Amino acid sequence: MKKRKQIRLDFEIDRLTNSIQNTISGDSFNTLVSQLTIADLKQVTRKSGWSFNWKAELANNANEVYKLTIVNNVSIVQGLLSLSVENDHVFMNLVESAPFNIGRNKLYEGVAGNLVAFACKISFQKGFDGFVAFDAKTKLIPHYEKTLGAYHFRGQRMIIPTKAAQILIDKYFKS
């Protein structure tokens, strides 16, 4: 099997919100996380501003690929998450906010936080006590420690432990 190129994640946690929040009006919108489909791939291309090859990510059977949408507007993808279920944790391969949710003029805040919280939720569902790992770009390690409660394991590896995972889940997923 071909070895996957290691990607160090560089998503930014702009703010931890209760769902996602419109940066202009301040309104919060409930979100839905569901599996990315082949039909969704038309709108998540590099040509339309996305950084990663989500078609390849979806084609890799070792990955689970999810999209974040607004409950009453499921046709527009707000962000994407690729994860792998390992022996004792969930590994986030990629996290990406939609191009219109990045930078100073972003439309919504909280997209990346929402997706990370979902990865934590999957980890609990799989019996891994919320443990999520990912590889971060070096300059963002302190950012993830502060915003996600992750700890720096070694190299670029970051781990979100049980307590921090539960805080994220409680923030984004109301039971």
Image (tube, rainbow, N blue to C red):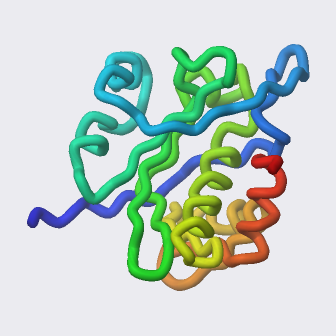
Q: Is residue 33 above or below residue 121?
A: above
What percent of the width, then of the height, locates residue 137?
A: 51, 61
Left or right of 48 on screen, residue 114: right
What percent of the width, then of the height, locates residue 96?
A: 51, 40
Between 143 and 86, the one nearer to me in the picture? 86
Query: In the rendered image, which quarter is residue 158 located in?
Result: bottom right
Residue sitting at 50 percent across and 35 percent down? Answer: 67
| In the image, farthest residue toward the left | 1
Number of callouts in the render?
0
Residue sitting at 39 percent across and 74 percent down? Answer: 86
Residue sitting at 11 percent across and 63 percent down? Answer: 2
Left or right of 58 on screen, residue 74: right
Residue sitting at 33 percent across and 24 percent down? Answer: 41
| In the image, farthest residue toward the right | 26
What percent of the width, then of the height, locates residue 74?
A: 57, 19
What percent of the width, then of the height, locates residue 140?
A: 62, 60
Left or right of 63 on screen, residue 149: right
Query: In the rendered image, which quarter is residue 25 located in?
Result: top right
| In the image, farthest residue toward the front | 175
Position of the N terminus, as image quadrant, is: bottom left
Between 158 and 38, the one nearer to me in the picture? 38
Left or right of 107 on screen, residue 5: left
